[in-house]
Amino acid sequence: MKLESSPPLKALPAPRTRFRIRWTPVLFLLPSIIVFIVFKYYLIFSAVQISLFNYDIVNPPGRFVGLENYFVFLQTSTFWLALKNTFIIFLLSVALTFWVPIVQAIFLSEIRKANGVYRVLYQIPSILPVVAGALLWKWMYNPDSGLFNYLLGKIGLGPYGWLNDINMTKFAIVLPGFFASGGIGVLLYYAAIKSIPAELFESAKIDGCGPWRRIRSLVLPNIRFVILIQFISFMSGALLAFDNIFILTKGGPADASLVVSLLIQRSAFEQSNFGMSAALSFFMFLVIALLTVIQFKLQKEEN
Amino acid sequence: MKSNRISERGEKGLRFTSYAVTILFLLFGTLPLVWLCLTSIMDNESIQSATPKFIPDVPHTITVTLDFTGADSGDETFYKKEAMEAIWFPWASLIRNNIGEIIVNGTRDGQQLFRAKATSAQFYVGQMSIVPTRVVNDQVMKLKLPTIAERKLSDFEWYGPASKPAKATAPSSDHEVAKLYRDFFVSHDVLAGKITSVGHSRNKLRLFDSFASLQHIALGKAGDLGFYRYFINSGMVTFTVIIWQLVFAGIGSYALSQLIRSSRLRFFLLMFFLATIMIPGVSILIPQYILIKNLHLSDSLWAIILPHFAWGFVIFLFKGFFDQLPKELLQAARIDGAGELRTFLKIVVPMSIPVFTIVAVMTFVPVWNEFMWPYIVTKSPEHWTFPVAMNDMQQTTNRNTIVRPNLISASGVLSLIPLLILFISTQRFVEKGINFTGIKG
């Protein structure tokens, strides 16, 4: 076959199309690109800008103060207390809630009968709106007339102050998450476990490795990536939790549950200090970005 | 089958543990919800007492016959005042007794003059403005009559004299609550008429008065639609966001996945979208607030809707799915002369129902439940979404209404219903969709 006989192909207008803009993908992508620019990129740059000003909402942008907002909040004890509380609440949520859907999914994958029913049932607790859940728990925690002190009293414990007790309030904020975990996370882990090749399980069985060993050295390593992805979104969710804390305690008692996200809301909408609030929020963005990068690094090193 | 399976060491123990753990977690998860549903139909005394009851008690119905034979006669307003006194004063004093409704039949010379009724939905909403104190006299009730009429806090049917023969008076009941009712008027002599009988029964319908109360409260706040307003607001916000995500994020991700040939550009655009996942909502709260304010959109539903249009995670889900579409099929459609939009609508969409469902569900839940941003950006109740309205209800006094736990439960139950329907109806597609997304690992 003579390859030289193909000049007609070369003559096709290929070189022209390379530099011609194809409008269809542009049109398809344009709406998304515009909203992302306006509601993400513009806003995060704007956050940095506002944080450099003593922002005046009536006559924006107000007086330029450079990094002063950052220095000011870094020197207040309230900020460090809020940051400490934020991380304690985060660690408590890891200890109380993060592992729950993993365990649920692992044991769910061992159940063969009516598995779908359990999966539906696992969704139900997590769909209760955070606000409704927090309101419900708020009066279950009531020291005088709440359900918890009554039930614990029956077995001779308590009464506890729950949300009103400085030492207990963080725990009481996190505890509802334990009951309401499950949800779509269970489905994600379950799908990940089910996608592990069956041959691996079969050979593990033939090798006589027991079920606990199998979960530890076969299932967990294989769903590690899902765990990482879930942990990253869990982390930013827990570090910036607002709704439940706002409804349960509003930061009290005696700032024992004051977290940075409450501080951000407070300084902007109660003290009208928008510059400070933006500085705090950009600081939190940096913290979370840093933690995410560290995790990806750790993940890479392990591989 | 069984003989082919290789049995495992410790298999039985594992199966037992699996069932035990699963059932335990399901119990933990459902208990708060069961408590929510139970308390929504319980009276507050049972909820808040030091020894809570777990079974809702059917509320009491008190039926009173008030006879005006021989008393001074008056006009309709006079009888109305009498009826309201017979309802509101004793109820305020018997507030701990789980009364569901009080019905007053007024008679004179064997003719029925009027029939008045108040349900607990009406009573608890009006309690703070009608009977805030324990002062019992004619003057107080005269002042309150316009409020009762305006806020529809009681029903009053006027028959007029000599138009309707009275029914035979039911025998007085000796139930404890009926006795307490009679005792109240022994010590407080305000009625011109004479109580000839006090009947007692129970009405199961009154269990659900907490739901009706929600409507009564909201009517005064959020306009004519009342509580439905919040529902409609939440629904409109959620619906608009879902439509945007399905249409624009869907078609954008399709272009990103299949139509952009330059791999460098594709990578750049993908990063452009995905990097925004790292930006937490709280971090851009202030500029977002200022932007919405500058667009003159604050305190409107658009203020809640617009920021949800930019969701990197949805693009990630869509792209993960569209990357796996068979290229040959799309190529075939193009060769047949279908335009890109047509290819997308006729070929891609029907193949991608699972991913569209999962995007719809994953959009629905956070938008429906979102609290912080709507709370900050909306001020007037007619723009509140459901969670904002719920938060408002826990404030102890709310337009002269003491808000009670069972109201909060009732609104919680209502907020749950759309999500419950959504999850049960889409579970199948969601599970299918999850298997296709990139997150699976």
Image: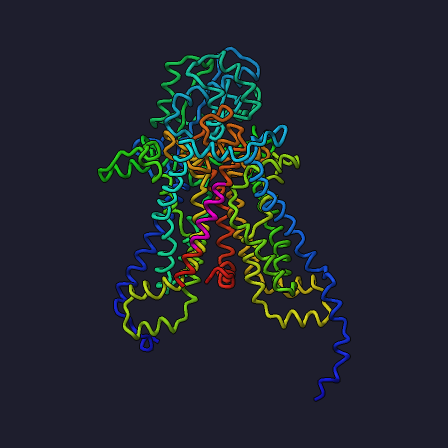
Find out whether residue B268 is within the magenta segment: no
Residue at image location 43% in from the left, 56% down from the top: A297
User: Is residue B167 in sight in this rendering?
Assistant: no
Q: Residue B150, position in %: x, y?
A: 58, 23
On the question of residue B36 being in view, the answer is yes
Query: Residue B253, image x and y in percent?
Result: 61, 58
The x, y position of residue B25, in whole percent, is: 34, 52
- How many labels were placed on the picture? 0
Q: Quadrant of the N terminus of chain B?
A: bottom left
Horizontal and vertical percent position of residue A145: 33, 32
> B126 or A283: nearer the eye?
A283
The magenta stretch is A283-295
Q: What predominant SS class does the magenta segment belong to? A: helix
Assess whether residue A292 is covered by the magenta stretch.
yes
Question: Can you tell which quarter of the image residue A22 is in?
Answer: bottom right
Q: Is residue B144 left or right of residue A187?
A: right
What is the quadrant of residue A119 in the picture? bottom left
Determine whether B184 is above or below A170 in the image. Answer: above
Residue furthest bottom as drawn: A1
Q: Observer-nearest residue: A74 or A32? A: A74
